[in-house]
């Protein structure tokens, strides 16, 4: 089976290639895209010999050509157009969508429209356009399989179950680095502190999302579309051991859980090989070494981003796309030390409050809402920083 990989140089991309190494020759790389980490991408191209590759922009393409020399003589695509060509490569049977952020929406949607199996690891496309993507998948008879560990766990628990038998889905969350931090101390949280996730090794953006619990909020939106259930049947609980990846409570009182070590290679391999299961080269779970499993309710006063995600689902239409865009802009501003950690939810709520919801009847409508939300976010950041400069405030991070 030939695989196209969107986002080859990120954490999920590298883990996907590791799984393909293990499963070779049953699986092989057909096409790949990356952003601007062309040094790593060049090494991957030399090893996997894809038929087509794409990068973020022209400078990255020129640098990649120089690095590869005569090792790759094929065409190098650029930007969204190049990513779409990777996602729709004719011989590809499975597309792994691991590109961070909203830029993965268009190529992922195009792969679905081509009727391909899509293993989706990035939350943003389904958050922005879940209704549109699932509708297009039904029309094209495409298959969307979740790679995100929580949704992958739910998919495993739900094999053979009827939707009418589901009482609720339970997404677990580690709680991030500030689970035990008093709310009064949130004003002083630094970027370095927020990037120290207690369980998972992830990219910077998703690590901040985990610290605010927005990551779990985005997963709630994603679960609504993947499993066709309303938000009041999707719950979140804190589970610091990150051993139980998610649970399903059935109407007869039974609860099924999927457990495993914190290793993304497991859900990636599951998505590639489904409905088969093949031996994996990752350690098995040792419950005796873990000793105990803890669960607690999330604190929405400390982590309002989770509440905002539920609010966006209830508002419907373009609101989840606005939530996602505002969050991306807020996280980028925090990482650049232009806003504080506590201002991330303030920015998002402001933008959501000022948005007029419209129906997600087309990709253009969703992209327009995304653009509006990013502009509104930048205006909020500019005004906020201008006010602080006027008061003579020092750096706050």
Image (cartoon, grey):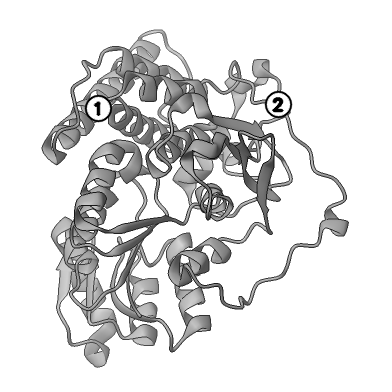
Residue 31, position as x, y percentages in the image = 27, 75
Q: Secondary structure at mark 2?
A: loop
Q: Earlier in the sequence, mark 2 or mark 1?
A: 2
Residue 147 seen in the figure: yes
Where residue 318 is drawn, which disc sits there?
A: 1
Residue 231, position as x, y percentages in the image = 46, 27
The residue under the point 29% across, 21% down is: 382
Where residue 181 is drawn, which disc sits there?
A: 2
Image height of 87 relative to 123, above or below: below
Mark 2 is surrounded, within 10 Å at the Cα level, by few (under 14), some (14 to 19) or many (20 or more) other residues, namely few
Quadrant of the frame with the N terminus? bottom left
Q: Quadrant of residue 252?
A: top right
Mark 1 is surrounded, within 10 Å at the Cα level, by few (under 14), some (14 to 19) or many (20 or more) other residues, namely many
* Residue farthest bottom in this picture: 70
State left or right for residue 293 relative to residue 138. Answer: right
Q: Nearest the camera: 119 or 103?
A: 119
Q: How many marks?
A: 2
The residue under the point 85% across, 45% down is: 292
Q: Are marks 2 and 1 in contact (CB under 8 Å)?
A: no
Residue 193, position as x, y percentages in the image = 62, 38
Image height of 110 relative to 351, above or below: below
State left or right for residue 137 relative to residue 194. Answer: left
Image height of 182 relative to 8, above or below: above
The residue under the point 68% across, 41% down is: 255
Q: Secondary structure at mark 1?
A: loop
Q: Nearest the camera: 35 or 397?
A: 35
Query: In whole angstroms, how far apart are the C-alphas of marks 2 and 1?
Result: 34 Å
Q: Quadrant of residue 118?
A: bottom left
Q: Nearest the camera: 146 or 374?
A: 146
């Amino acid at each position: 089976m030939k695989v196209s990989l969107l986002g080859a140089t990120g954490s999920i991309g590298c883990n996907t290639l590791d799984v393909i190494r293990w499963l070779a020759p049953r699986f092989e790389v057909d096409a790949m895209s990356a952003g601007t980490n062309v040094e790593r991408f060049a090494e991957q191209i030399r090893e996997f010999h894809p038929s087509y590759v794409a990068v973020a922009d022209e400078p990255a393409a020129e640098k990649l050509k120089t690095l590869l020399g005569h090792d790759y003589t094929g065409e190098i695509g650029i930007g969204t157009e190049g990513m779409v060509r990777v996602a729709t490569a004719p011989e590809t049977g499975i597309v792994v969508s691991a590109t961070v952020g909203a830029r993965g929406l268009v190529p992922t949607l195009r792969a679905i429209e081509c009727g391909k199996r899509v293993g989706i690891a990035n939350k943003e496309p389904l958050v922005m356009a879940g209704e549109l993507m699932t509708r297009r998948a039904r029309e094209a008879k495409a298959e969307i399989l979740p790679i995100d560990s929580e949704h992958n766990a739910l998919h495993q628990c739900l094999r053979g179950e009827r939707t009418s038998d589901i009482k609720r889905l339970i997404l677990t969350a580690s709680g991030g680095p500030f689970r035990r931090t008093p709310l009064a101390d949130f004003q002083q949280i630094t970027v370095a502190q927020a990037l120290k996730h207690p369980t998972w090794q992830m990219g910077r953006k998703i690590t901040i999302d985990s610290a605010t619990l927005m990551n779990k909020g985005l997963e709630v939106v994603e679960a609504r579309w993947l499993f066709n259930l309303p938000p009041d049947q999707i719950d979140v609980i804190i589970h610091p051991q990150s051993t139980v990846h998610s649970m399903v409570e059935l109407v007869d009182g039974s609860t099924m859980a999927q457990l495993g070590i914190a290793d993304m290679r497991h859900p990636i391999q599951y998505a590639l090989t489904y409905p088969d299961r093949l031996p994996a080269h990752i350690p098995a779970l040792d419950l005796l070494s873990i000793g105990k499993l803890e669960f607690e309710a999330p604190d929405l006063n400390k982590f309002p981003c989770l509440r905002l995600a539920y609010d966006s689902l209830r508002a419907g239409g373009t609101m989840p796309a606005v939530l996602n865009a505002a969050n991306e802009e807020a996280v980028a501003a925090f990482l650049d030390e232009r806003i504080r950690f506590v201002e991330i939810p303030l920015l998002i709520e402001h933008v959501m409050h000022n948005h007029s919801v419209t129906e997600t009847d087309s990709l253009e409508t969703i992209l327009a809402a995304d653009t509006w939300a990013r502009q509104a976010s930048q205006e909020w950041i500019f005004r906020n920083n201008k006010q602080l400069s006027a008061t003579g405030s020092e750096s706050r991070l």
